[in-house]
Amino acid sequence: MPSKELKLVFTWMDSHKAELKANWERLQNGEEAVRIKPLRK
C-alpha cells in the first residue's frame, strides 16, 4: 500500500480508536460488531 494511503488509514484508525476498541470487545464476547463510518478521501 502506498505510504499516502497508509497514512490515511492510520489517521482513520486514530480517529475511530474508541469505536474499534468497542467492536473488538463485542466480538470477543460473541456479539456482532457495529458498523463504523468508512474512510473517505
Image (cartoon, rainbow, N blue to C red):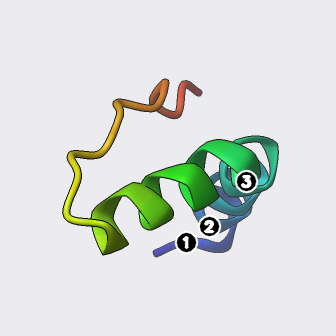
Q: At x 35% / y 34%, what residue is drawn?
A: 34
Query: Mark 3 is on which residue type?
Result: Lys
Tag 2–tag 1 contact (CB < 8 Å): yes
Q: Is residue 19 left or right of residue 10?
A: left
Q: Where does the C terminus fall, quadrant-wise? A: top right
Query: Mark 1 Cα within 10 Å, few/some/many (few <14, many 20+)?
Result: few
Q: In the displayed structure, would residue 23 be above or below residue 24?
A: above
**Quadrant of residue 40 within the rendered picture:** top right
Residue, x 71% and y 62% (percent of image)?
Answer: 10
Percent from the top left, x then y, of residue 36? Answer: 45, 32
The amino acid marked with disc number 1 is: Pro
Mark 3: which secondary structure? Answer: helix
- Between 21 and 4, the residue placed more toward the observer is 21
Residue labelled with disc 2: 6
Disc number for residue 10 = none
* Residue 33 vertical placement versus 41 (above, below): below
Q: Which residue is mark 1?
A: 2
Relative to 25, residue 41 above or below: above
Q: Nearer the viewer, residue 30 or 35?
A: 30
Q: Are marks 2 and 3 in contact (CB under 8 Å)?
A: no
- The reply, left or right, for residue 39 in relation to residue 12 is left
- Disc 2 versus disc 1: nearer the observer: 2
Q: Which mark, by number, is residue 17?
A: 3
What residue type is disc 2 on?
Leu
Is 29 situated above or below 19? below
Q: Secondary structure at mark 1?
A: loop
Mark 3: give few (<14), some (14-19) or many (20+) Cα within 10 Å. Answer: few
Label 1 to label 3: alpha-carbon separation: 22 Å
In this view, which residue lies farthest toward the front?
Answer: 29
Tell us which disc is closer to us: 2 or 3. 3
